[in-house]
Amino acid sequence: MHAKALRMNHDYMTLVHCRDKAWGQHAVTRIGSIFVATTAVGISVPGPWWIFCVAAMTIGWAIEGTFYRWLSNKIDHPDDLDPRDLPAIKQLTIRAIICLVALYACPFLALAFAPDPGPSLGLIFACGSLLVICGQHVLDRNMVYKTLPVITLAVVLCAVRLGDGWIGYLLGFLAFLLCVNTVVLTGASVKSSEDLIEAQGQALRLANELDERVVQRTRELEEAVKVAEEANRAKSRFLATMSHELRTPLNAVIGYAEMVGEDVRSGDLGSTEADLEKIRNAARHLLGLINEVLDISKMEANEQVCRPSQFDVRHIAQEALDAIIPRAAASHTKCKLEIASDLEPLAYNDEGKLRQCLLNLLSNAAKFTTSGTITLTCRASGQKAEWIAFEVADTGVGIKEEDLPRIFLPFFQSDTSFTRSVEGTGLGLAISQKLAHLMGGDLIVASRVGQGSTFTLTIARFFETTSEQEISSLAGRTEDKA
């Protein structure tokens, strides 16, 4: 990520562009031109002028090669480069180029004082340097004003030496205009270079955004696949569980019905009433399983509606707790009801759905608690007591931390040996949470393995109807009765 961000930095991209253009693509041409110029001076200009050219060329090449390696080492390892160092590196590069230009241009300046054809050679190669400055010195808008003075002086002096009297001065003036045009053209080159770098940066940013979107979308698809696979496995487990859960009461109904038939045929009706009661119990259990499947189907099809009515919270809570006391007593579990003193007794919501939720939660607690305690707590919730909270706390086996996010998914059952030994479809918690949402509240869980679980069901104290006036009048009647 650091390298990607650095490649979108304007200073970094400018340095890369300068290194690749000035010291990469143009290096052979520039070095070759300097060598040719030095050779031409040595062959055609009388005197030791070639020594000066060779010395400048040798020192310049040494400095240029050293600096090129240093700059490449910096910008070719973006992961090790601090973006805060880029301005300093850029300024150092500009200074290095200024020194190199001055070093390479000094022989051309000296040739203005050399015998013929020294001034002509100096003018030719100085004008070539102007072309280099025009196209390559684009690190900074003001860079040309720092690299041009020595070249300008060489061009003007060499031009003046080519003519006598006013002709020489005219040539010098024209040479100066050539340098001025170089400044203008360099400004255009800088603008074009900046536009190119900005376009490259924009392209990199767009590519980076596209990569991030692809990665994000891939993660979403992977997560969707995992969810789908988990849902498929959960439904498979559900079907396997349901086949057993449905067969058990059906077999009981069929078996006891056959026994009743045999008793009727034999005339011995002594145990018929007890067998019929077992048939009724098995049928009720079977009906409950079917109702759970139908309930979750209706909820997924958004066919469930809330039918509010006024009821006593304490009465509903006590009734639900009484229904599971026999089952809890069979596993030596105590049941307690705690009602907050400041809880208003009357509420307006769907009484049947609240009863179903409480029975689901309490039955669930009774299934997984042995020789423990189940506590149902009723209290007001919210700043204005606009909700009622029902907490079902048990001291049972608890739920694994990794299963908590999925505990309310339809068909999901925590995969433990204990949960596999108890009956159930795995739909009770999913149904209860959907019913809680339908009643304007929610259902959450907190649990630790071996320490028990606490399910907190909240519902709206006054379910919102289509008329706010109706709610207000109902609230007033409730407070008067309280």
Image (cartoon, rainbow, N blue to C red):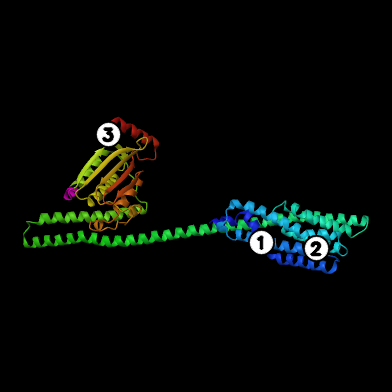
Q: In percent of the image, x 20 and y 50: which residue is there? A: 370
Q: Identify which residue, 425 or 201, lies in the foreground.
A: 201
Judge depth for marks 3 and 1 and give the one in front.
1
Q: Is 60 drawn above or below residue 324 in the view shown?
A: below
Residue 224 among magenta residues: no
Q: Which mark is residue 66?
A: 1
**In terms of image quadrants, where is residue 27?**
bottom right
Residue 330 among magenta residues: yes
The kind of residue on which mark 3 rests is Ser
Query: How far apart are labels 2 and 3 at the CA level?
Result: 101 Å
Regarding residue 351, the answer to whether it shows in the image is no
Crowding around mark 2 (Cα neighbors within 10 Å: few <14, some 14 to 19, many 20+) is many
Q: Earlier in the sequence, mark 2 or mark 3?
A: 2
Query: How far apart are labels 2 and 1 at the CA level?
Result: 24 Å
Q: Determine whether label 2 and label 1 are within 8 Å by CB.
A: no
Q: How far from the left and from the top, in percent, is residue 159?
A: 86, 58
Q: Identify which residue, 203 or 166, lies in the foreground.
A: 166
Tell me the SS state at disc 3. Answer: loop
Q: Which residue is mark 2?
A: 125
Tell me the SS state at disc 1. Answer: helix
Q: Earlier in the sequence, mark 2 or mark 1?
A: 1
In the figure, is residue 245 to the left or right of 219?
Answer: left
The kind of residue on which mark 1 rests is Thr
Crowding around mark 3 (Cα neighbors within 10 Å: few <14, some 14 to 19, many 20+) is few
Q: Which residue is mark 3?
A: 341
Q: Determine whether label 2 and label 3 are within 8 Å by CB.
A: no
* Prevailing secondary structure of the magenta residues: helix
Q: How far from the left and from the top, in percent, is residue 206?
A: 58, 57
**In terms of image quadrants, where is residue 442?**
top left
Span highlighted in magenta in the image: 326-332
Judge depth for marks 2 and 1 and give the one in front.
1
